[in-house]
Image (cartoon, rainbow, N blue to C red):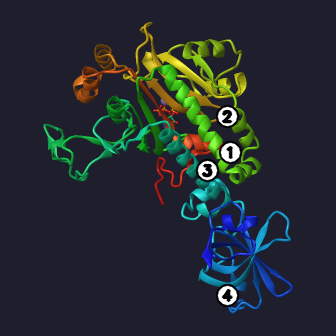
Amino acid sequence: MQTIRVAEARKESAVGREVRLQGWVRTRRDSKGGFSFLELNDGSSLANIQVIADGSLANYESEVKHLAAGCSVTVEGLVKASPAKGQATEVQATRIIVHGGADAETYPLQKKNHSFEFLRTIGHLRPRTNTFGAVARVRNCVSRSIHSFFQEEGFLYIHAPIITASDCEGAGEMFKVTTLDLANVPKAAGAIDFAQDFFDRPAFLTVSGQLQAEIFACSLGKVYTFGPTFRAENSNTSRHLAEFWMIEPEMAFFELTDNMALAERFLKRIFADVLAQCPEDMQFFRERIEPTAIETLERIVTSEFVRLTYTEAVDILKASGQAFEFPVEWGHDLQAEHERYLTEQKFQKPVILYDYPKSIKAFYMRLNDDNRTVRAMDVLVPKVGEIIGGSQREERLDVLEARMREQKLDPANYWWYTDLRRYGTVPHSGFGLGLERVVQFITGMANIRDVIPFPRTPGSAEF
Ligand code: ATP
Ligand code: MN
């Protein structure tokens, strides 16, 4: 007898097999004929498998008849064609081993249709619900798709450090990493004496693996990182987490147009893989979360993204006649309402904005000849807004150092970064994709806290 997953046992091809299934009971229904139906789920698919537990089972009266939502069991039995609608197979149990009970009075998931807010308070149990199971499977599919895409394109997977002494964005929204005694911080000349700290200097959790990815791209050509990043920004929005996963490809000899083309191909590949590999989960999201979920992805996979300079976007927004809360003005960052107008009303598809004013972008982005804009690009999608931020990097040493000084950064602190421009510099480009923003876009889940297994946000880090 083979142990198989529910997803496999649900296939017609399993009929006639003696199998062992292991999982959690979702419901039990007793029939007048002296037997029971169990709905069993093991996470391998959204759908459960129906188990028929006959009254003749040795533990029928003592255990099986008391099974309720949340109980864990091993079921041995024969897979049969099911006469019931909506399922190809069912399992006639010959033996049921009960591993753990779950008191129906106290089990929090006994009741159906809890709010997502409530489910966040039981992060240890929410993966047992349909929605969070579906999110976990889609997230897994996206992660595999990302690795497949880059591996097939000849990229090397680089593991960027999580602890760093450099602040990539110069934004100062970093978590500090220290072993100093916070109740008794050593001081030297009035300031904190970091010479006594673990790394001999202030250290942080990384906000991006980009600078390190650049080192490897400028040595090995095409690389990507895929790891956790941390931002201590106190933004309580539905699109920000304090800990999120970012994918950052970095390519030597890529200009901004190559970068845009890669980003578009990359996103389309992810969407196509999810449509092909998670049809059941996507159907669930369409029915329960976002009616256009599947249609939107299908349309994007076969259409072209819009490409627009920041300046063109500002002109379109100004001419739109829309009453925006924040006025649009060249030189200011676009707000969510502006991005949504472009992706949801004007074009109804993803938009790549590029050539942003240098004043609102990071020092490392390549300066255009107009001396006012840089080779930055953001990929915007309906509802979620920005999912990718990237740029062509400044490869000219003198321009890079001048831009650092403009932004009050000391080039000496970035000596290894500037060395890349000193020795064998090359044009190169890259971008960062937020994993959770993609999963949010694909599933239609409204809040980013519900597409990561364990969300970290201001004031919240339980589980
Ligand atoms: P935003 O303007 O949305 O705050 P950003 O411009 O600060 O984002 P980047 O530094 O460009 O973000 O990071 C690259 C990508 O990482 C973004 O396009 C987004 O997909 C994702 N991202 C950034 N910050 C967060 C966050 N706090 N939580 C989740 N994902 C994020
Ligand atoms: Mn950005």
Q: Residue at x 50, y 23 (%)?
A: 258
Which amino acid lies under the numbered mark 4 shown in the image of this protein? Glu
Residue 84 is left or right of residue 435, and the answer is: right
Say which residue label 4 marks: 63
**Are the two marked residues, 1 and 2, in contact with CB atoms closer than 8 angstroms?**
yes
Which amino acid lies under the numbered mark 1 shown in the image of this protein? Leu
* Numbered disc 2: secondary structure: helix
Residue 398 is left or right of residue 147, and the answer is: left
Residue 282 visible at all: yes
Disc 3, ligand 1: is the CB inside 8 Å? Answer: no
Upstream in sequence: badge 1 or badge 2: 1
Q: x and y percent of residue 196 in the render?
A: 16, 47
Q: Which mark is residue 301?
A: 2
Say which residue label 1 marks: 275
Which of the two discs, 4 and 1, sits closer to the camera?
1
* Numbered disc 3: secondary structure: helix
Which amino acid lies under the numbered mark 3 shown in the image of this protein? Val
Say which residue label 3 marks: 138
Which of the two discs, 1 and 3, sits closer to the camera?
1
* Numbered disc 1: secondary structure: helix
Disc 2, ligand 1: is the CB inside 8 Å? Answer: no
Q: Residue at x 27, y 42 (%)?
A: 203
Q: CA distance from mark 3 to mark 4?
A: 35 Å
Above or below, 339 relative to 47: above
Q: Which mark is residue 37?
A: none
